[in-house]
Image: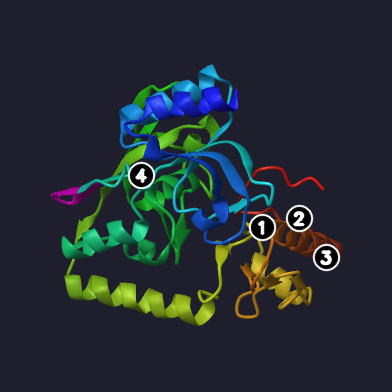
Amino acid sequence: MSRQLYEALCSAVKTKEQVKQDEPMKNHTTFRVGGPAAYFVTPMGEEELRQVLAVCRRLESPWFILGNGSNLLVSDRGFDGVVIDMEKGFSGIRTEGNQIDAEAGLLLSQIARRALESGLTGLEFAAGIPGTLGGAAVMNAGAYGSEMKDVLRQVRVMTPEGEVREIPAQELELGYRTSSILKNGWIVLSAVFSLEPGEPEKIRGRMDELAVARRSKQPLEYPSAGSTFKRPEGYFAGKLIQDAGLKGFQVGGAQVSEKHSGFVINRGGAQASDVMELCRQVSERVKEQFGVALEMEVKTLGDFEK
């Protein structure tokens, strides 16, 4: 079966170099932890993606869409399936008037930079978010009071069956870290942003201001996956964790950041199991002390059962 799957994946893309076996996922996540993906495929465009999905369906292989890996924790055992890397093959971008049409593999920072160069305002908040457009649209990423739903006009997606659809933003059910894209298991191909004309100096100034705020408040010097827990209604996760006396709490190489308690960092040599155990204990302590259930914002991939 494994040989059959490998050969089928190779035939779905242009070159065999686009298909890797036993690829270490620690090289593809900002946490810098995680075991190997059985298969790691880089489709170059929509048709190759459609063919890769068809192979996975036909041979009943699980698959996972990867962007920048900035909101992902992969098990130490890895993932016994196909990881589909969207970064290289989906990186086109064009500006037309007040709109930017960008493909899913682009980093939000790259799109924000294009907006700045084009004298368009509205994406300043996204300049420091480490994820790709695909993941940001799925999760309605946001920061500093702004969200993707404020600037998205429409999103082009592919269904797991390979059908392409263009969906207006108002039909995407964009909410706090959720969307109809997530609920339906669609794959983001590209999106159109609707922005406003602005003065480049002011746009750059706002980006610089937010960059300073991030550096001063977030542990950017350590590998992490950003905010580890979702914001519970009526609370802030970082404040609850700090009030529970857990700032600096450590399990193996994983630690609750001493700079911002909402971040779990890889202090050095962490395993994915360290991160999960730390998150479990943090959640347990917060629930015991404050009666609030913390839910992880970071997505997990692979088997975490002991």
Q: Secondary structure at mark 2?
A: loop
Eye-nearest disc, 4 or 2: 4
Looking at the rendered structure, which numbered label has been put on residue 104?
4
Mark 4 and mark 1: Cα distance apart in space: 29 Å
Left or right placement of residue 208 versus residue 130 in this view: left
Q: Are discs 4 and 3 less than 8 Å apart at CB?
A: no
Mark 1 and mark 3: Cα distance apart in space: 15 Å
Up/down of 198 relative to 182, above or below: below
Give yes or no for residue 80 being in the magenta stretch: no
Mark 1 or 3, nearer chain start? 1
Mark 1 highlights which residue? 232
Residue at the spot 43% in from the left edge and 61% down from the top edge? 130
Left or right placement of residue 225 versus residue 267 in this view: left
The disc labelled 3 sits on which kind of residue?
Arg
Can residue 276 be seen here? The reply is yes
Q: Residue 168's spot in the image, x, y percent?
A: 34, 35
The disc labelled 2 sits on which kind of residue?
Ala
Looking at the rendered structure, which numbered label has been put on residue 285?
3
Magenta range is 94-101
Residue at the spot 26% in from the left edge and 63% down from the top edge? 113
Mark 4 and mark 2: Cα distance apart in space: 33 Å
Q: Residue 137's spot in the image, x, y percent?
A: 42, 46
Mark 2 and mark 1: Cα distance apart in space: 8 Å
Mark 2 highlights which residue? 293
